[in-house]
Amino acid sequence: MLQIRDLCSGYRDITVLRDINLEIEEGETLALVGSNGAGKTTLLMSISGHISPNSGKIILNGTDLASKGPDKRCFLGVGLVPEGRRVFPDLTVFENLVVGGYSRPNKMQAENITRVMDVFPRLSDRQKQLAGSLSGGEQQMLAFGRAMMSNPSLMLVDELSLGLMPSVVDECYEALGKLVKKGIAVILVDQNSDAAMGFCSNSLILETGHQHWYGKSSSAPKVSI
């Protein structure tokens, strides 16, 4: 479903990632593992279109994403749960979800919102509440829900557990499990690398922008972060 070939990417004149190659099939899970500055977020931003790669290819379901902006990639099936949640604080929970589904027909909005509420029942009671007044855990749930509204085939999750209570982290992992059962592929970054690799079938270990190791999580070498 997703193919990345010889990807080099970074910020302006600074190259962060070099020669990244990977493949993800429908419903597969991949943990991105590495120390701060290894290039994990840069890879997610390159896939989602917020960074333009210097070279290489990113192909999703047969479509080369090189000329596609973030909005087009969202329409093609890329969902992003960014680091720090980044919900719209002055919009309600309901309005944040509607924004997340802008790339889909209006008739799908109600169905998708119901689907989000089924996964995160806590959001159902807070539909009219401003997103900025939610707890960190609730904002993370909303960020997940907003990404789900676009019916993604690929979900990118950056720093799932950052600043969250263990019970909320468990809820988020449970939600990811439900998405995977529906055939959605997941690329996951989590400061708890053991949790990420325990959840994901495959892992990619990055070291200073290079692909240090790639394969089954069960066979991955010990990682010290």
Image (cartoon, grey):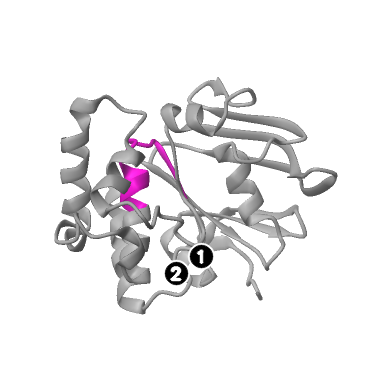
Residue drawn 19% across and 60% down?
126
Q: Position of residue 23 (x, y in %)?
A: 56, 38
Q: Give the amino acid type for the residue marked by disc 1 in the picture.
A: Asp
Secondary structure under the numbered disc 1 in the rendered image: loop
Query: Mark 2 highlights which residue?
Result: 161
Label 1 vs 2, first from the N-terminus: 2
Left or right, 118 with respect to 78, comes to: left
The magenta region covers: 144-156
Left or right, 136 with respect to 125, comes to: right
- Seen in the picture, residue 55 relative to 187 is either above or below; the reply is above
- Crowdedness of circle 1 by 10 Å Cα count: few (<14), some, many (20+)? many
Q: Give the CA distance from mark 1 to mark 2.
A: 6 Å
Residue drawn 16% across and 37% down?
110
- Residue 128 versus residue 63: which sits nearer the camera? 128
- Crowdedness of circle 2 by 10 Å Cα count: few (<14), some, many (20+)? many
Residue drawn 81% across and 47% down?
15
Tell me the number on the disc at residue 150: none
Judge whether residue 173 can be spotted in this image.
no
- Residue 125 versus residue 74: which sits nearer the camera? 125
Query: Mark 1 highlights which residue?
Result: 190
Q: Give the amino acid type for the residue marked by disc 2 in the picture.
A: Ser
Residue drawn 77% across and 59% down?
208
Q: Which quadrant of the view contains residue 18?
A: top right
The C terminus lies in which quarter of the figure?
Answer: bottom right
Q: Position of residue 56 (x, y in %)?
A: 73, 31
- Residue 89 versus residue 208: which sits nearer the camera? 89
Q: Position of residue 34 (x, y in %)?
A: 65, 64
Contact between labelled residues 2 and 1, with CB atoms less than 8 Å apart: yes
Is residue 118 found inside the magenta-colored segment of the image?
Answer: no
